[in-house]
Amino acid sequence: MSVACVLVMVSVFPSAASLHVAPDGDDAHAGSADAPFATLDRARDAVRALKERAALSAGGVTVWIHEGVYRRLGSFTLADANGGTAEAPVVYRAAPGETAALVGGVEIPAGAFAGVTDAATIDRIDPGARPHVLCARLEGLGLDDWAVFPDAFREPPALPELFYNNERMTLARWPNGDWAEVKRIVESGPAPWRQHASDQPGTFEYDGDRPARWLRAPAVWLHGYWCFDWCAETIRVKSIDTDARHITFVQPHGYGLGSGNPGPRRFFATNLLEELDQAGEYYLDTESAILYFWPPGPLDDANIVLSILADPVIRLHQASFITLQGLTVAACAGTGIEIHGGRACQIAACHVLNTGHNGIVVDGGRDHTVVACDVHDTGTAGLRLSGGDRKTLTPSGHQALNNHLFRVSRGQRTHAYHVHLAGVGIRLAHNLMHHAPHQAIGLAGNDHVIEFNEIHHTGMETDDCGAFYMGRNPSERGSVLRHNFWHHIGSTRAHGSCAVYFDDGSGGQTVFGNVFHRAAGGHFGAVFAHGGHDSMVNNNIFVECKLALGHAPWTDKRWRDYLDADLWQDKLLNEVDITKPPYTDRYPGLAGFMEFDGEPRHNHAARNVVVNCDTFVRGNWTLTDNWVTDEDPGFVDAAAMDFQLREDAPAFKRVPGFEPIPFDEIGLHTDDLRPTLP
């Protein structure tokens, strides 16, 4: 989907000064086009010198970064002294038509690889793989302090990863590309949520004989959905009993082993030399600093990179009026780009990929913008933006506009979103988000605006989830979700998946003018509320959703228990105070919230068009002027997923006051920063 429309975009100022950087430059040069610097660090120092001499006139300075790879073993940091002003910004920009790549890893030359000769090691490798597996010693590559897997983790440690021609290789695993299933839980370990006390770490029975191959491995980690299909965790194995086919962990899973959701518990084993049995897999021996690899193609002329930089590749710390434009940031063990504090920095038309953690992080400050960036194949989240003051409800002014985000959450398979928003007053608009195992947009805080985004194929291996998710804090109110297109959400295994999920008491949000197509699975609705109330769901179109609107009400006792609990007392009265201004002024629905005494708790739905959905509504909703139909409401071309309503559409007659949804304006659009669409 595309449209040419006007947004708040990056301003590119004419520059009164220019500096140049090129891989074949020299830091002793003047930094001109004919005599460029060799490093970004030298250019940064030159910009600072211009500032100190008060030589930055109107238009500021542009640092042109020329074609090539700029390897970073430490962050490229820009601080307050390196920033600009509104009239004289500082711009770091790839030269036109050139790819300037900042890479947080080291290249391993083809000549570093050799056949495996150690007999004991060869014996651990699958016989069919032995002719193909090569090894390389990694001493001298800057890996003095290896990150190692802890005994249990959800967010992956900053462990080096291997990339072949910019493609992430697979840490040797079993099964290949699939899941094994737990046969039977022997001992769940402690599980307070199901009132099960235990001093054991957890044991399960497996099927088949495959784990017998792992007995000589120095350590075994299993990654799995051990209880709930919204909580994946990797845990180290303590022992394997091949006679009983029992595996025991070194420490308990947070929720205990056993099905909290319907369906089998799933797992796979990871980083095992014994399972390096197909092209594209590798194994890291962190004790001996040796990499074992079955290359997917020839090594000669291949670009083989091991990511090692755990700190952000580019870090803006308390810096202001800096623009990063057209840069590629890739192959790092941590985050690609991070902004902390400062004001009015812009990340524009950058390509961030193959990170170990987040793609781009904006933490605090105000009026920062991420625009027209492509962010994909991240280990955790794509974008994380936070800022503003929740006590005073002061907005941050941050924006994420016209970005393409996909294949996130490669290392942390749950709760690592395409975009996570926190704080107050962030705008997320005209982005395309797709393909991830869990949720796409995570929200915390107040008064955010999420509009004109297209979101599809999320929640693809999880359950009890939404493409959009927020919950567990009723003080977080006032956000608006409008004019978004949500489609093909959830997996076939889900007992409950949805497009918009207001969980655990969340309420007071607005859902207006969205289109939901095949966006609900199991017994959830396309819009689903768990306990919460006072949300408005108006003027939306639901197409071929099993359930359009769902609500799982809480009993009076459950509400009273939550309100009296220390966690909600802290969130509602200490972190902020919902009984006083500005909360009582901004959100009248919070009046008397803490003194709740059995008042009706409803969400509200008005003027929605519901087409070919199995069920319209379930739970506590007040309904006004909704149209439920199996007829064509007047779509331009439903078969092609064009859900724009024609001017003569029956929906406008059947639903008085229904406002046209600007469907053709949803999603990415072309402009100077994004001249073509993916």
Image (cartoon, rainbow, N blue to C red):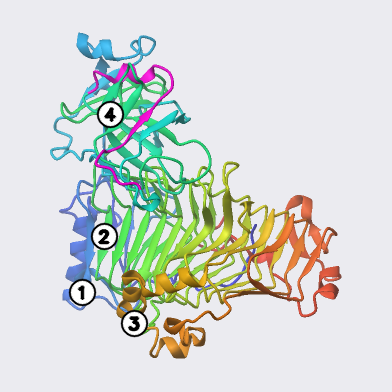
Q: What segment carries the magenta color?
A: 196-217
Tell me which numbered mark, 4 or 2, is placed earlier along the sequence.
Answer: 4
Question: At 43% from the left edge and 84% from the top edge, which residue is drawn?
Answer: 595
Q: Is residue 234 above or below residue 386?
A: above
Check if residue 209 falls in the magenta segment.
yes
For residue 449, the mark is none
Camera-side mark, 1 or 2: 2
Tell me which numbered mark, 1 or 3, is placed earlier along the sequence.
Answer: 1
Question: At 27% from the left edge and 14% from the top edge, which residue is drawn?
Answer: 124
Q: Taking 264 as reference, is 361 left or right?
A: left
| Amino acid type at image mark 4 | Val
Tell me which numbered mark, 2 or 3, is placed earlier along the sequence.
Answer: 2
| Residue at the spot of label 2 | 315
Whether residue 531 is visible to the viewer of this picture, yes or no, is: yes
Is the stretch drawn in magenta largely helix, strand or loop? loop
| Amino acid type at image mark 2 | Arg
Considering the numbered disc 4 on the image, is that residue within a helix, a strand or a loop? loop
CA–CA distance in space, label 4 to label 2: 35 Å
**Classed neighbour count for the residue bearing mark 2: other residues with Cα under 10 Å, few (<14), some (14–19), many (≥20):** many
**Classed neighbour count for the residue bearing mark 3: other residues with Cα under 10 Å, few (<14), some (14–19), many (≥20):** some
For residue 220, the mark is 4
CA–CA distance in space, label 1 to label 3: 36 Å
Looking at the image, which is closer to me, 551 or 147?
Answer: 551
Tell me which numbered mark, 1 or 2, is placed earlier along the sequence.
Answer: 1
Residue 630: percent from left, percent from top: 83, 58
